[in-house]
Image (cartoon, rainbow, N blue to C red):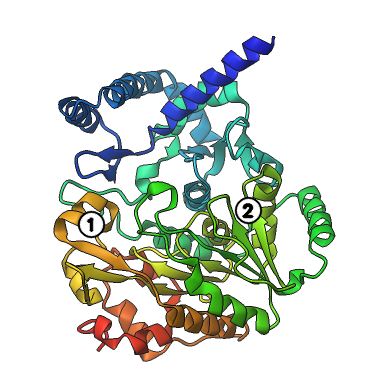
């Protein structure tokens, strides 16, 4: 029995790893994201083969076979698809490999299905990293049985019976242009208009009670009613690009400001984080490497007054619960702050080592898709410059004001910034706003856009 369980778990692991590749594919040689197709998979196969990357070639060949098997199996599920339509249910083609994309998909796929008149069926095997979500949410229909996940997998990959990834992801065409224009903002506003008072991401009562008990036992000096959550992504995290990373030291002044204002502050950390950056009884570093604390994230972020960070995994939980968000070091057209209590500041874009205006970056197609291909960025001489400690500190001050006033009225400059952005940019279409200090201290960067 012991060996049978090991073999079974190994099979589950292999199957779900292959199955998750149905959601998107990196197109060679520039490695930009796209929806999988036979043409792209075969092109990637030849690229890998020509470059003598034999192991990756074999993996891609296995995926090509799996991709076509799934597309054939979909035919046999057609009668069941009509049954699902009749009872008003659709699947969601959710990515459960990483916390950020998982919650992003949960948030916008479930809402999109609801807008179209369907309840959502969510397939997340309990053997995955996020199999615990069924224990957290009270009104999400999550199927965690591995066998059922395997049997039903073709349904989540069929657009007739599922909200697919390509309906809301930032995929590029061959010219490095975004295929979808602000899909998340459109879903956010339409859902808010039609279902404003309907909460679909409720937490289970017993989960809340257990987490409250845990919080007060472990954090006697922290005030749950005046809690802010902070998460930082290290530069070149897991040997990836610097698109979303930054230096934690640039945040210290801002964090001290918030602590001095009387907030309790929890910083979510992992094994790669630089730790113990502040010594204060109202500051705690909370490791999310263990399963218990991974589960606790949802309670903490749901309970907090606001979330502060940058484009990284945990901020997606704040988006899911529509919390006030301050997002720093934003390097893409999308922000995670969608409501009026949201604020953000941008990384600076450089061309051949020289900082250029945001209008120039837009004209270079950076925000319309180039940022999604690191190799294309290098080819064009594009790089990024992080926010300074002063910019971060001032954004923290503004966020403190934002979450403590009843109504915030954007300035003329903030409104003009959105007005002159292209429609494909999500930040144009959210209710959040760029930080006013950031505009006023970087006027040259907004030349021909605001000023």
Q: Is 424 rendered above or below residue 154?
A: below
Work out whether mark 1 precedes mark 2 in sequence or the reverse, and give the earlier one: 2
Q: Which numbered marker is on residue 416?
A: none
User: Residue 33: horizontal and vertical position, in percent?
Assistant: 29, 45
The residue to which callout 2 is attached is 201
Q: Nearer the viewer, residue 384 or 417?
A: 384
In this rendering, would 192 be left or right of 306? left
Circle 2 — which element?
loop
Q: Nearer the viewer, residue 430 or 450?
A: 450
Q: Nearer the viewer, mark 1 or mark 2?
A: 1
Circle 1 — which element?
helix
User: Residue 411: horizontal and vertical position, in percent?
Assistant: 41, 89
Using the rendered view, name the quadrant where residue 51 is placed: top left
Q: Quarter of the image containing the C terminus?
A: bottom left
Q: Is 169 rendered above or below residue 220?
A: above
Q: Nearer the viewer, residue 181 or 118?
A: 181
Q: Residues within 10 Å of mark 1 (few under 14, many from 20)?
A: many
Q: Is 252 rendered above or below residue 64?
A: below
Q: Residue at x 52, y 25 (%)?
A: 13
In this rendering, would 1 be left or right of 239? right
The residue to which callout 1 is attached is 370
């Amino acid at each position: 029995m012991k060996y049978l369980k090991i073999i079974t778990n190994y099979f589950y692991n292999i199957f779900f790893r292959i199955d998750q590749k149905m959601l998107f594919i990196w197109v060679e040689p520039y490695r930009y994201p796209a929806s999988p197709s036979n043409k792209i998979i075969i092109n990637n196969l030849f690229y890998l083969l020509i470059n003598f990357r034999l192991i990756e070639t074999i993996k891609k060949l296995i995926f090509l076979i799996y991709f076509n098997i799934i597309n054939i199996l979909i035919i046999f599920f057609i009668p069941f698809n009509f049954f699902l339509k009749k009872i008003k249910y659709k699947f969601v083609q959710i990515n459960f490999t990483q916390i950020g994309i998982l919650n992003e998909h949960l948030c916008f796929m479930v809402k999109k299905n609801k807008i179209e008149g369907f309840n959502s069926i969510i397939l997340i095997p309990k053997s995955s990293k996020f199999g615990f979500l069924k224990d957290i949410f009270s009104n999400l229909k999550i199927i965690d049985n591995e066998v059922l996940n395997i049997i039903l997998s073709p349904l989540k990959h069929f657009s007739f019976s599922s909200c697919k990834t390509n309906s809301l992801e930032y995929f590029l065409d061959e010219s490095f242009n975004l295929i979808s224009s602000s899909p998340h903002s459109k879903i956010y506003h339409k859902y808010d208009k039609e279902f404003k008072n309907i909460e679909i991401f409720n937490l289970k009562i017993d989960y809340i009670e257990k987490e409250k008990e845990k919080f007060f036992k472990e954090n006697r000096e922290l005030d749950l009613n005046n809690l802010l959550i902070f998460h930082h992504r290290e530069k070149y995290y897991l040997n990836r690009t610097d698109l979303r990373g930054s230096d934690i030291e640039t945040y210290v002044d801002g964090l001290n400001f918030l602590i001095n204002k009387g907030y309790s502050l929890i910083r979510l950390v992992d094994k790669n984080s630089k730790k113990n950056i502040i010594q204060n009884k109202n500051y705690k570093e909370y490791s999310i490497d263990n399963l218990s604390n991974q589960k606790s994230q949802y309670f903490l972020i749901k309970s907090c007054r606001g979330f502060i960070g940058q484009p990284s995994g945990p901020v997606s939980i704040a988006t899911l619960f529509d919390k006030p968000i301050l997002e720093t070091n934003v390097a893409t057209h999308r922000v995670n702050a969608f409501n009026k209590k949201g604020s953000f500041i941008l990384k600076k874009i450089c061309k051949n080592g020289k900082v250029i205006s945001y209008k120039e970056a837009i004209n270079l197609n950076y925000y319309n898709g180039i940022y999604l291909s690191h190799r294309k960025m290098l080819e064009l001489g594009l790089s990024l410059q992080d926010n300074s400690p002063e910019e971060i500190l001032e954004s923290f001050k503004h966020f403190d004001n934002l979450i403590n006033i009843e109504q915030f009225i954007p300035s003329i400059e903030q409104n003009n910034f959105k007005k002159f952005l292209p429609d494909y940019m999500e930040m144009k279409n959210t209710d959040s706003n760029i930080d006013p200090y950031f505009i006023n201290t970087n006027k040259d960067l907004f030349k021909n856009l605001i000023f």
